Amino acid sequence: MTNPLVEIRRVRKSFGAHEVLRDVSLSVNPGTVTVLLGPSGSGKSTLLRCINHLETIDGGRIIVDGELIGYRQKGGNIYEMHPKEISKQRQNIGMVFQRFNLFPHMTALENIIEAPVGLNGKNKNAAKEEAMALLSRVGLADFANHYPAQLSGGQQQRVAIARALAMKPKLMLFDEPTSALDPELVGDVLDVMRELADEGMTMIVVTHEIGFARNVADQVVFMDGGVVVESGDPEEVIGNPQRQRTRNFLENVKHG
Ligand SMILES: Nc1ncnc2c1ncn2[C@@H]1O[C@H](COP(=O)(O)OP(=O)(O)OP(=O)(O)O)[C@@H](O)[C@H]1O
Ligand SMILES: [Mg+2]
């Protein structure tokens, strides 16, 4: 039996009176890919943001690699961590958003070395060498000195992935990484993600790319209204959904 890398236990989160996550539980084993599906407003981004404590939680707990995220338990009480500790935890968790990932005034290479050098005090030449290797890995070896504005959306997303990988994360979170891209650019980004999965990276991916979910995910989780409606093997959840809400959603994604 392996221990899960990510354990989300009975997490609750409200914004004011609006309960956005209601008792969400989920485990992610190391080296696996989990795809989160669900309609707009179902709480997918909020859940991802809770995993690296970009949002506080109101109940439950999130454990990554054995560490309680964002909080410290003392006696019977729970305290939020110091910002420095939170930032340290975040370094183990890479995140790629829908868009606006990169610093516009820095080249691709500078974007990638920024955190290792600035946050971790890594030697600049060593960081540059690693960044070049990462750029090759995402198919952008020739674009090191390009600024984001000189890159396509798909290229920018691949730089964003390389930048997250530069911190050697244990876990990668993706929030609709391809949904702002022109259709012809989606494939290159999904290919990089698939390679990352093949190399054994643990990933949680919010996406409407059902093909990616089917072919790459080890687990698909369907959320609606802040709860996990169903989860399991992609062929089961996508190919043979048990719940009407899941069926409705999949119909809309396929035809929408
Ligand atoms: N900072 C915030 N303040 C208030 N409400 C918020 C905040 N962030 C999210 N919400 C609300 O929480 C609910 C869930 O939002 P969330 O972004 O997690 O949904 P989602 O599943 O990612 O949707 P989408 O597919 O549109 O990205 C929505 O009703 C949203 O309006
Ligand atoms: Mg979202």
Image: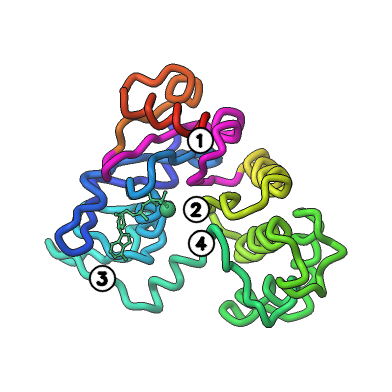
- Three-letter code, disc 1: Gly
Res 171 seen here = no
Question: In the displayed structure, does residue 101 sit left or right of residue 154?
Answer: left
174 over 110 or under it: above or below: above
| Residue at image mark 2 | 175
Q: Is residue 221 magenta?
A: yes
| Residue at image mark 4 | 92
- Kindly report which numbered mark, 3 or 2, lies closer to the viewer in this rendering: 2
Q: CA distance from mark 3 to mark 2?
A: 25 Å
Task: Kindly identify the residue that appears in the image at 45 percent across and 27 percent down.
Answer: 251
Question: In the displayed structure, does residue 43 sit left or right of residue 171?
Answer: left
Q: Is residue 42 magenta?
A: no
State the SS at label 1. Answer: loop
State the SS at label 3. Answer: strand
**Residue 11, position in %: x, y?**
25, 50
Q: Which residues are magenta?
A: 201-227
Q: CA distance from mark 2 to mark 1?
A: 20 Å
Q: CA distance from mark 1 to mark 3?
A: 42 Å
Marks 1,4: beta carbons within 8 A:
no
Would you say the beta carbon of the disc 2 residue lies within 8 angstroms of ligand 2?
Answer: yes
Task: Kindly identify the residue that appears in the image at 80 percent across and 54 percent down.
Answer: 139
- Three-letter code, disc 3: Glu
- Three-letter code, disc 2: Asp
**Rendered image: mark on residue 256:** 1
Residue closer to the observer: 255 or 161: 255
Task: Kindly identify the residue that appears in the image at 65 percent across and 65 percent down.
Answer: 163
